[in-house]
């Protein structure tokens, strides 16, 4: 598009400049030849833009989602439009140069309006036929057709009909103005479409973690690859917004909108002086200053957290859970101070922040009650530490290791490797069994019974020997075996042993039970409960059944 525009425009400019240097035409023809250069440049821009959008000869390069049939049918119309634009610009310049009368100018404008409207009608008819074919194909494939192009086409037809009515009523200038605005909007839309894609591709190609710039940023400055990719997305968004603003200004220029771009940049200049909201002066400079302060504050907090977690806390006598609590509290306090610092740099004083917080407290009390409750409960957990990271806890019927404690919830890893997320308010307001709070040991309990005539010393020695043979059972506290009760001709034993962690209880208890059953079976010791049977007794025997009398 750039080459197709510049080459004809520079050729026309070189031709005109050469004629001027050679003094081959009078000075009053300057308007005509300037109009020739402008008409050549705009017609070349129109033709090259259409070629870049349609890409009739190189369909694999085509950016717009159009078919080959559409490109082939619309390309001749674009050449006609380029010729109409050249002729229109040249005729306007010729009329200004010769000082044509008002009647002659109106006649030329009537012809121009008819030609423009005729071209628009032909183009809309071609687009309508092509769209009808596409809709049929999409409906056959079960795809719902979009309504955006149809709405734009309907608006264009309405403007064309209105322009024809105005032309018939004698409003020639209005009719020509409407026709030119339609064509100008179509040209701007096509150019904006290509430039938006170009800006996005250029930004994503330049700011990419695998590009030269991205590799330089990651290796020399230490920026993460994801940050480079995010920067590319932000640059692309900013460039696209700027292009849209420029296109909007150019679109408004025919309507006398303060000379188009001049109006937009003038308003931007006024906006840069700032505006006042609630007694607070807000300007782009203040916003930028607040953003810089916020970014600098976060960098300071991040550096401080790195020193705290890697240098200071490891040098203390605090355990892992206490270090996590101190780190979390320091991080949230630091972020809160950074936010206050950024608001202060924006011109919002501490008293206004306090007023804002008091106004938000009502909404927080009603709408965010559960979140606030969990937040306060998290702070209580971090301060009192009834539950620490690494504790073995039971919440309801679930048991597991505490892996993470935040200000909103606590994560517990269960035995099946799943994660139970418990709101902190549940851990504060409800009963929680912490098996490792006061002691890290776990206890094994065995209960069984033997017949009354079984030697109890032998049973006790067998149990204590199996406990001693199990590697996971601790020597201190020492294992023990007690007679719990004597009932129904059996002796009930209750035996205890300790292991290093509650996590080892289940496995160790299974090993002890298997060894106990093998030993009792080898020595013929009955283990279990007394078999029970049900007997029915009656005081009177049942009467014998008598045969019914036989009738004669």
Image: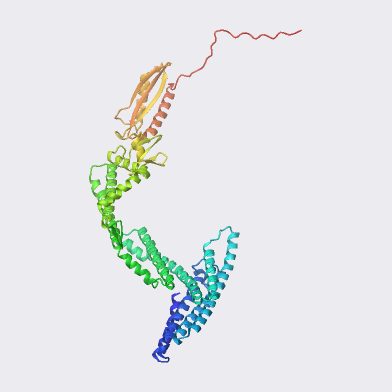
Colour mode of the rendering? rainbow
Place of residue 517 in the rendered image (x, y in percent of width and height, measured from the top left): 42, 26
224 or 137: which is nearer to us? 137
377 or 30: which is nearer to us? 30
Place of residue 345 in the rendered image (x, y in percent of width and height, measured from the top left): 26, 57
341 or 60: which is nearer to us? 341
In the image, is residue 460 above or below residue 90?
above
Place of residue 460 in the rendered image (x, y in percent of width and height, measured from the top left): 36, 22
Q: Quadrant of residue 123?
A: bottom right
In the image, is residue 200 above or below residue 531?
below
104 or 296: which is nearer to us? 104
Place of residue 91 in the rendered image (x, y in percent of width and height, measured from the top left): 48, 83
Q: Quadrant of residue 13?
A: bottom left
Please state if 276 lies on the left or on the right of 19 as rendered: left
Q: Residue at x 25, y 46 (%)?
A: 314
Q: Quadrant of residue 122?
A: bottom right
Quadrant position of the N terminus in the picture: bottom left
């Amino acid at each position: 598009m750039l080459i197709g525009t510049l080459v004809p425009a520079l050729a026309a400019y070189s031709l005109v400049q050469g004629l001027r240097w050679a003094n081959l035409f009078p000075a009053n023809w300057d308007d005509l030849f300037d109009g020739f250069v402008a008409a050549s440049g705009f017609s070349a821009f129109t033709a090259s833009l259409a070629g870049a959008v349609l890409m009739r000869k190189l369909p694999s390069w085509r950016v717009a989602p159009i078919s080959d049939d559409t490109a082939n049918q619309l390309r001749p119309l674009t050449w006609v439009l380029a010729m109409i634009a050249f002729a229109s610009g040249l005729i306007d310049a010729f009329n200004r140069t010769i000082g044509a009368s008002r009647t002659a100018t109106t006649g030329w404008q009537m012809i121009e309006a008819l030609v423009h409207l005729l071209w628009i009608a032909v183009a809309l008819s071609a687009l309508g036929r092509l769209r009808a074919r596409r809709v049929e194909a999409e409906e056959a494939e079960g795809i719902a057709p979009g309504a955006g192009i149809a709405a734009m086409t309907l608006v264009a037809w309405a403007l064309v009909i209105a322009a024809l009515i105005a032309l018939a009523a004698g409003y020639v200038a209005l009719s020509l103005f409407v026709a030119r605005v339609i064509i100008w909007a179509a040209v701007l839309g096509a150019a904006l479409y290509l430039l938006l894609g170009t800006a996005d591709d250029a930004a994503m190609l330049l700011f990419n973690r695998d590009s030269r710039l991205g590799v330089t940023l990651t290796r020399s400055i230490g920026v993460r690859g994801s940050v480079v990719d995010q920067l590319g997305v932000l640059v692309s968004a900013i460039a696209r917004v700027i292009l849209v603003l420029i296109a909007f200004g150019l679109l408004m220029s025919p309507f006398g909108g303060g000379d188009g771009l001049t109006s937009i940049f003038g308003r931007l200049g006024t906006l840069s002086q700032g505006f006042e909201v609630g007694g607070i002066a807000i300007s782009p400079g203040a916003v930028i200053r607040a953003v810089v302060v916020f970014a600098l504050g976060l960098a300071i907090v991040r550096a401080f957290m790195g020193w705290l977690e890697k240098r200071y806390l490891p040098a203390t006598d605090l355990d892992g859970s206490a270090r996590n609590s101190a780190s979390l509290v320091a991080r949230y306090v630091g972020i809160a101070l950074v936010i206050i610092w950024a608001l202060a740099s924006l011109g919002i004083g501490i008293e206004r922040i306090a007023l804002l917080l008091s106004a938000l407290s009502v909404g927080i009390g009603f709408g965010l009650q559960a979140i606030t409750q969990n937040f306060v409960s998290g702070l209580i957990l971090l301060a009192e530490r009834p539950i620490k990271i690494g504790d073995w806890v039971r919440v309801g019927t679930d048991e597991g290791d505490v892996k993470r404690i935040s200000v909103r919830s606590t994560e517990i890893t269960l035995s099946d490797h799943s994660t139970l997320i418990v709101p902190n308010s549940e851990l504060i307001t409800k009963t929680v069994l912490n098996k490792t709070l006061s002691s890290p040991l776990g206890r094994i309990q065995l209960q069984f019974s033997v017949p009354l005539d079984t030697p109890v010393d032998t049973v006790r020695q067998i149990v204590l020997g199996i406990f001693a043979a199990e590697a996971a059972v601790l020597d201190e506290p020492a294992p023990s075996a007690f007679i719990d009760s004597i009932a129904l001709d059996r002796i009930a034993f209750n035996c205890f042993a300790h292991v290093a962690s509650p996590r080892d209880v289940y496995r160790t208890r299974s090993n002890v039970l298997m060894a106990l059953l093998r030993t009792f079976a080898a020595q013929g010791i009955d283990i279990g409960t007394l078999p029970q049977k049900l007997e029915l007794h009656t005081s009177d025997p049942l009467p014998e059944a008598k045969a019914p009398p036989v009738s004669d």
